[in-house]
Image (spheres, rainbow, N blue to C red):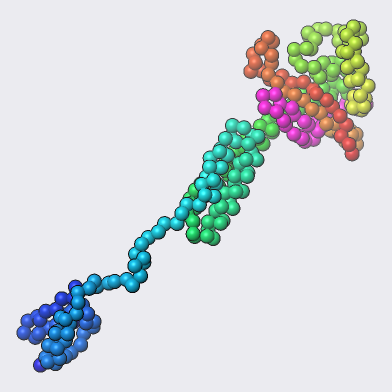
């Protein structure tokens, strides 16, 4: 009488019902045996030693080892955090840019080398450094544009006064707010009768400067406009550099003018008021 043999887990054997069905984990598939063959198979399987259903030949295969954290990734994260301080000081912009470049290199290295972990640290450091640098660049550009616009009217007033021949009024604009003469003073009489030799020499240098003579040659029909903003330096006290051109006489030489913005001295009023004075005006080389 033929018997049907199937497999079952845990190396256990049994005869099932009258049909003598043999089930064992070590016999795979389904085959048909004669009754005598089945009994011999049962005896041979029963003599096998007990062993796990699955056993690895490599004792270390089941051990999970995590990759060590890259020191470069830790450093990249620290630089990224420090670069955020550039938000409070634009002088730290180079640090933010260095941190971004370093973190980018670390991210690239970790993406090609799987023997070390810490990719998220390097990526976070890169993100922080980029945010710090972007903030500084954006805020600096916004601040500079504002200062260029604020300085333009003061530069135009100075140049228009000189072009119209009002040299002493223009000279007053080169002095800080606290050292200027009070409104209503006869400036020509005052400066032509100076008793302070140092102040007198300073006035003479201003009047004889090549840039002063060139600006005066434009005449009272001049129309000074800002050609471009050159640079801004300083923090509490800003020095703003502009390049000015006479729209009425475009063939004339351009004038580079530097102005200083500072807060009004406390003895003259509120320190929240900004005042301007001209530092120098020079002819722009062709």
Residue depicted at 87% across the width and 15% down the height: 168
Residue depicted at 23% across the width and 83% down the height: 29
- Relative vertical location of residue 103 with respect to residue 145 in this rendering, above or below: below
Hey, which quadrant is residue 267 in on the image?
Answer: top right
| Viewport quadrant of the C terminus | top right
Asked if the stretch drawn in magenta spans residue 225, the answer is yes
Residue depicted at 69% across the width and 14% down the height: 265
Residue depicted at 74% across the width and 21% down the height: 276
Q: Position of residue 169 (x, y in %)?
A: 84, 16
Residue extending furthest toward the left: 18
Instruction: Please state if 285 lies on the left or on the right of 44 as rendered.
Output: right
Q: Magenta-highlighted stretch: main secondary structure?
A: strand
Q: Which residues are magenta?
A: 217-244
Hey, which quadrant is residue 238 in on the image?
Answer: top right
Q: Position of residue 80 (x, y in %)?
A: 55, 42
Instruction: Please state if 173 lies on the left or on the right of 272 as rendered.
Output: right
| Viewport quadrant of the N terminus | bottom left
Q: Position of residue 263 (x, y in %)?
A: 68, 19
* Viewer-side residue, 32 vs 53: 53
- Relative vertical location of residue 66 with respect to residue 201 in this rendering, above or below: below
- Relative vertical location of residue 99 with respect to residue 267 in this rendering, above or below: below
């Amino acid at each position: 009488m033929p018997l049907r043999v199937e497999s079952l887990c845990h190396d256990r054997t049994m005869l099932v019902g009258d049909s003598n069905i043999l089930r064992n984990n070590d016999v795979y598939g389904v085959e048909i045996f004669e009754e005598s063959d089945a009994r011999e198979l049962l005896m041979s399987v029963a003599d096998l030693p007990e062993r796990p259903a699955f056993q690895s030949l490599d004792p270390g295969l089941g051990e999970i080892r995590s990759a060590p954290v890259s020191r470069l990734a830790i450093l990249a994260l620290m630089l990224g955090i420090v670069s955020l301080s550039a938000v409070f000081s634009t002088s730290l912009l180079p640090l933010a840019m260095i941190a971004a470049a370093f973190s980018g290199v670390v991210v690239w290295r970790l993406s090609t080398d799987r023997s070390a972990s810490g990719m998220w640290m390097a990526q976070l450091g890169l993100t922080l450094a980029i945010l710090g640098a972007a903030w500084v660049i954006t805020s600096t550009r916004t601040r500079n544009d504002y200062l260029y616009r604020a300085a333009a009217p003061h530069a135009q007033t100075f140049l228009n006064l000189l072009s119209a021949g009002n040299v002493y009024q223009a000279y007053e604009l080169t002095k800080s707010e606290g050292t200027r003469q009070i409104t209503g003073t006869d400036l020509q009489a005052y400066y032509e009768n100076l008793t302070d030799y140092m102040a007198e020499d300073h006035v003479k240098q201003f009047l004889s400067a090549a840039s002063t003579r060139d600006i005066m040659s434009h005449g009272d029909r001049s129309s000074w406009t800002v050609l471009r903003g050159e640079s801004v330096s300083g923090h509490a006290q800003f020095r703003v550099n502009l390049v000015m051109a006479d729209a009425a006489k475009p063939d004339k030489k351009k004038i580079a003018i530097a102005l200083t913005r500072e807060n009004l001295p406390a003895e003259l009023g509120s320190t929240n008021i900004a005042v301007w004075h001209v530092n120098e005006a020079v002819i722009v080389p062709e």
